[in-house]
Amino acid sequence: MTATDFEGRLREASLRVTQPRLAVLNAVHTHPHSDTESLIGAVREELPEVSHQTVYDSLHTLTAAGLVRRIQPLGSVARYESRVGDNHHHAVCRSCGVIADVDCAVGEAPCLHASDDNGFVIDEAEVIYWGYCPDCSTRS
Ligand SMILES: [Zn+2]
Ligand SMILES: [Zn+2]
């Protein structure tokens, strides 16, 4: 992904192209599943003067526009990724908290069918796989 690709994404979403938004998109793309603090650090490598608030605001805007996906496993702070729209899931390490992408087994939401939908029109099943990452499972 280049700066031009990120500009295109902002324009497609009818968002104004700004330096902080481009830098935040780039940071989220380069560091998938990062939390806000790490993203601020990454954005500052490109834009040293950027404020916390600007990064927060950009993340919020990009998430609301669907360009960035926010995930928050239990016990973790919010994390962000640029892989959106494919209903992929996550595997989370119980020990160190590292997150890995897991492709949806079915390919589209909802990938699990409720045994009883209680009359709801269900469009998504939120799936998180919990366990131990390769590093943590070999260490113990
Ligand atoms: Zn781990
Ligand atoms: Zn992911």
Image: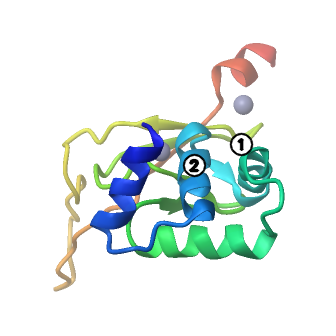
Residue count near mark 2 (Cα–Cα under 10 Å), binned few <14, some 14–19, many ≥20 = many
Which quarter of the image is occupied by the C terminus?
A: top right
Which residue corresponds to the image point at 77% horizontal and 37% vertical from the top-left? 96
**Left or right: residue 1 compared with residue 138:** left
Query: Is the residue 16 above or below the residue 68 in the image?
Result: below
Q: Quadrant of ligand 1?
A: top right
C-alpha span from label 1 to label 2: 18 Å
Q: In which quarter of the view is residue 40 placed?
A: bottom right
**Left or right: residue 121 compared with residue 90:** left
Query: Is the residue 79 above or below the residue 16 in the image?
Result: above
- The residue at which mark 1 appears reads as 97
Which quarter of the image is occupied by the N terminus?
A: top left
**Left or right: residue 80 compared with residue 112:** right
Q: Is mark 2 within 8 Å of ligand 2?
A: no
Q: In which quarter of the view is residue 138 placed?
A: top right
Which residue corresponds to the image point at 76% horizontal and 76% vertical from the top-left? 53
Q: Is mark 1 within 8 Å of ligand 1?
A: yes
How far across and how far down the image is residue 130, in percent? 57, 42
Give SS at disc 2. helix
Q: Please name whichever residue, 6 or 71, is drawn nearer the observer in this view of the structure.
A: 6
> Mark 1, mark 2: which one is toward the viewer?
2
Query: Is the residue 29 above or below the residue 20 in the image?
Result: above
Badge 1 or badge 2: first in the primary sequence: 2
Q: How many marks?
A: 2
Judged from this view, the residue extending furthest toward the bottom is 119
- The residue at which mark 2 appears reads as 28
Give SS at disc 1. loop
How far across and how far down the image is residue 125, in percent? 32, 62
Question: Three-letter amino acid code at disc 2?
Answer: Val
How far across and how far down the image is residue 123, in percent? 22, 70
Which residue corresponds to the image point at 72% horizontal and 46% vertical from the top-left? 46
